[in-house]
Amino acid sequence: MIPERRHQQIFQLIETEGAVSVSALCQRFNVSEMTIRRDLAALEQKGLLRRVQGGAVSARGRSYEPPFLIRSGAHQEQKIRIGQAAAALAWIPMLVF
């Protein structure tokens, strides 16, 4: 497997699991510990993870929140339905004098 593909898979694992160990990555990719350590160093240098003793964790931390532009684009259909329901509840007939 080429290093770039392995880096992508390592990053995805960390994003889903929160943390990975060097030994688990060695078994998963059937490569040496030094190869995994170099991979983790490269990903850490890019700011994608943080190395810890025996493995790596997500660089985002627990308080990570995606940027507003990403959050605003998520769940568009549900947001539209909520807005329509709220608009229907807020309808007040105008009184004409």
Image: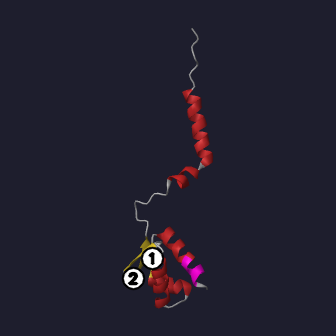
90 w.r.t. 29: above or below: above
- Image mark for residue 44: 1
Residue nearest the viewer, comparing 40 with 24: 40
Describe the element under mark 1 as helix, strand or loop.
helix
**What kind of residue is marked 2?**
Gly
Give the x, y percent position of residue 73: 58, 51
44 w.r.t. 94: above or below: below
Give the x, y percent position of residue 3: 57, 84
Q: Name the residue carrying label 2.
A: 54
The outermost residue toward the front is: 45
Give the x, y percent position of residue 68: 50, 52
Give the x, y percent position of residue 9: 56, 76
**What kind of residue is marked 1?**
Glu
Magenta-drawn stretch contains 6: yes
Q: Nearer the viewer, mark 2 or mark 1?
A: 1
Describe the element under mark 2 as helix, strand or loop.
loop
Q: Main secondary structure of the magenta part?
A: helix
> Magenta part of the protein: which range?
3-7
